[in-house]
Image (tube, rainbow, N blue to C red):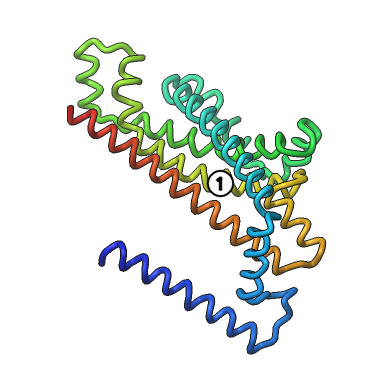
Amino acid sequence: MSVNRTHLLSLLFLIILIIFWEGIVRITGVSALIFPAPSAVGVVLWEGLTVGFLWPHIWVTSVETLLGFTLGCAIGFVTGIILGEISFLRRLLWPYVLASQVVPKLALGPIFIVWFGFGMTSTIVITALICFFPLLENTMTGLQSASPDQRTLFRMLGASRWQTLLKLKIPSGLPVVLAGIRVAIVLALVGAVVGEFIGGSAGLGASIITAQGMMDSTLMFALFIVITALGMLFYQLTSLLELCMLKGRFEVQDK
């Protein structure tokens, strides 16, 4: 089955789902407070985009997501290299790293608000903390991807530890690291929205809390759609970056 046909079937399934949803709401007469019709959600979404109400919140959430994602991935990648290369530090610090991840980030929110105040900074910190672990774990795993024969060859050629890391381990582990980045970008958006739930004054998460206070379920569903679309956009851009980097890696290897 071709990719285009698969996409068409996926789109057809979405259309059928929307029609079914609309039909159920109209037949049962369920209140919009409980389950709004997709037509009503579409009207609210269109008005929010055309009037301009949603765009500032989309911008705030996007900035928080990308900044937290960049910060968390950078720290996770560097820390993953350090712990992957220095076994003593890995044994010493790994329990603490793991402990920092099992604590629910929602529970840390009030502490971050005390430390960083309400607004963007605390949300970025929460987002970075969520993105940190996937990159750390995948980087450590990726560094072990090089085959024993390749490592032996580098030792026979007299390569230093630094040269082996840069020329062998990181390139070999790149697919695993990039897979961690794909996971992290989705978690980043979740972290940004959750952070806005706790201490945000703007953004899509803060807008959901506002809509909840107004008992406006239709607006909440519209915001859910925006968040979903934004997450899919970020994921596709990350997948495109992964494709370009892996293509460049293979081209370099061919040369």
45 w.r.t. 84: above or below: below
**Picture quadrant of residue 96:** top right
- Residue pictured at 67% horizontal, 60% vertical: 48
**In this image, 109 relative to 249: left or right?**
right
**Picture quadrant of residue 166:** top left
- Residue pictured at 37% horizontal, 33% vertical: 142
**Picture quadrant of residue 107:** top right
- Residue pictured at 61% horizontal, 69% vertical: 42
Please name whichever residue, 109 or 86, is drawn nearer the observer in this view of the structure.
109
SS at mark 1?
A: helix
166 w.r.t. 47: above or below: above
63 w.r.t. 23: above or below: above
**In this image, 83 relative to 170: left or right?**
right
The residue that disc 1 covers is 187
Residue 172 x %, y %? 30, 31
Q: Would residue 101 be visible to someone looking at this image?
A: no
**Of all residues shown, which one is farthest toward the bottom?**
27
* Quadrant of image for the C terminus: top left
Q: Would residue 105 be visible to someone looking at this image?
A: yes
Residue 120 x %, y %? 71, 37
Crowd class of label 1 (few under 14; some 14 to 19; many from 20; radius 10 Å): many
Q: How many marks?
A: 1
* Quadrant of image for the N terminus: bottom left
- Residue pictured at 40% horizontal, 45% vertical: 239
